[in-house]
């Protein structure tokens, strides 16, 4: 389970972690031993807690072995047990990764799958909240723009210039959420007596992406198990004297692909339908 | 994400209110609002932001009974509900 990998980071942020399912203690014991899981996997075989939360999946037939599963989702709660944030997906095959919650909500630095490009006038650094690509997982990507002194690029909403734009190739059914741009600066450009919305020095843009499903992603995975997401960054750089032509720079993120869990518990432990 | 779904719902309701101001027949407004709600409510997401979660007590993989108090860290906790460890 990918949560084990993020458990240390979660703890470093002062958070506890528990994962709840309708599995029996025997199934969880077997799973934890196979996957070397050290955080608590809690057993709710009658779905009592799942029901108390109001997240029982009612669309499952009551006589099926799957009856009792919840709508999958994650709560971030404070020390009083009050919900600070919650993450549920419309598509049940998708889910947010703990790394994206830590990076998006708790300021954990985005440092995985890191690469840098020196483009004209700007340096670009791309990174992700995790180095692992798993089907249906929602993670956070970042692009950091490093501008030399006196240089600026334009922010969305600017008139008459090309604003910074970050496009993604939607490889293998991967979905991209809108870019989160930081608040721009208003810069007065003396020579032309205009005020424009710009970014200077260092700016970080982020966006969530959700990896496609396994069958769609697989064809893009290399023999060594690598999955590369590509995109492009477009900008127009100017200094206080001149403006340069717009540039489009290819950017990428390299992940290690990990397929979904296929190994099951021993037959005698498996849950049966009614 | 939930936020975007909520803002979507808010937009639908705003549209319904706007239509109400234009004296759209009540049954039409209700039908619109109902469609919006059905579209949004496919996934039940439990306690809302700011609400306390229900108390719980469940055994973990070692058979040790855990509660919110026993799993929580100094700043809170992540509680992950998932389908199954045996899928």
Image (cartoon, coloured by chain):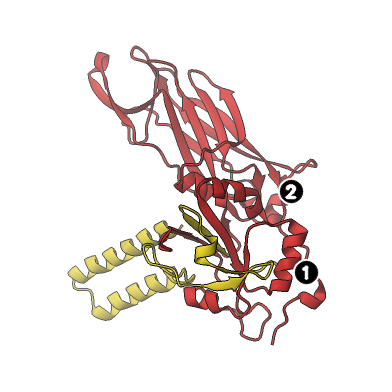
Residue B22 at least partly seen: no
The spot of residue A2 in percent (x, y) is 66, 53
Q: Chain ID for label 1?
A: A
Mark 2 lies on a secondary structure that is helix
Mark 1 lies on a secondary structure that is loop
Q: In this view, does A264 lie to the left or right of A128?
A: right
Who is closer to the viewer here, A174 or A116?
Answer: A116
The spot of residue B37 in percent (x, y) is 39, 72
Q: Is residue A202 left or right of residue A262?
A: left
Tell me the colour chain B is drawn in.
yellow
Tell me the colour chain A is drawn in.
red
**C-alpha gap between disc 1 and disc 2:** 29 Å
Residue A102 vertical placement versus A34 (above, below): above
Badge 1 or badge 2: first in the primary sequence: 2
Q: In the current view of this chain or complex, which residue is farthest to the top?
A: A241
**Residue where numbered disc 1 is placed:** A265
Q: Chain ID for label 2?
A: A
Looking at the rendered image, the disc whose residue lies closer to the viewer, 1 or 2, is 1
Residue B31 vertical placement versus A143 (above, below): below
Q: Quadrant of residue B70?
A: bottom right
Residue at x 42%, y 69% (from the top left corner): B47
**Residue where numbered disc 2 is placed:** A219
Q: Are marks 1 and 2 in contact (CB under 8 Å)?
A: no
Q: Which quadrant of the rendered structure holds the C terminus of chain B?
A: bottom right
Residue A137 vertical placement versus A202 (above, below): below
The numbered disc on residue A15 is none
């Amino acid at each position: 389970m990918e949560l084990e990998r993020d458990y240390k980071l979660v703890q470093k942020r002062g958070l506890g972690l528990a994962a709840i399912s309708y599995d029996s203690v025997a199934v969880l014991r077997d799973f934890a031993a196979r996957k070397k899981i050290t955080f608590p996997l809690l057993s709710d075989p009658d779905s009592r807690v799942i029901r108390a939360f109001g997240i029982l999946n009612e669309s499952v037939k009551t006589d099926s072995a799957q009856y009792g599963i919840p709508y999958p989702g994650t709560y971030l709660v404070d020390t009083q047990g009050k919900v600070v944030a919650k993450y549920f997906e419309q598509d049940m095959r998708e889910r947010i990764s703990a790394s994206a919650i830590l990076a998006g909500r708790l300021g954990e630095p985005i440092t995985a799958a890191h690469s840098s490009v020196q483009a004209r006038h700007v340096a670009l650094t791309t990174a992700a909240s995790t180095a692992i690509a798993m089907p249906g997982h929602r993670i956070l990507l970042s692009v950091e723009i490093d501008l030399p002194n006196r240089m600026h690029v334009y922010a969305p909403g600017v008139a008459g210039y090309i604003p910074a734009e970050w496009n993604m190739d939607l490889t293998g059914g991967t979905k991209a959420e809108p870019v989160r741009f930081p608040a721009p600066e208003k810069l007065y450009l003396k020579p032309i007596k205009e005020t424009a919305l710009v970014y200077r020095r260092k700016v970080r843009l982020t966006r969530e992406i959700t990896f496609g499903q396994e069958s769609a992603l697989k064809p893009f995975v290399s023999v060594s198990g690598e999955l590369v997401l590509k995109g492009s960054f477009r900008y127009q750089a100017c200094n206080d004297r001149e403006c340069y032509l717009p540039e489009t720079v290819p950017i990428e993120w390299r992940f290690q692909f990990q397929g979904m869990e296929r190994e099951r518990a021993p037959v005698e432990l498996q849950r049966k339908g009614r | 994400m939930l936020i975007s779904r909520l803002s979507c719902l808010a937009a639908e309701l705003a549209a319904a209110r706007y239509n109400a101001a234009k004296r759209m027949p009540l049954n039409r407004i209700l039908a619109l609002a109902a469609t919006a709600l059905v579209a949004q409510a496919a996934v039940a997401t439990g306690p809302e932001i700011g609400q306390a979660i229900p108390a719980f007590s469940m055994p973990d993989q070692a058979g040790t009974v855990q509660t919110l108090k026993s799993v929580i860290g100094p700043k809170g906790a992540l509680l992950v509900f998932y389908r199954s460890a045996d899928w």
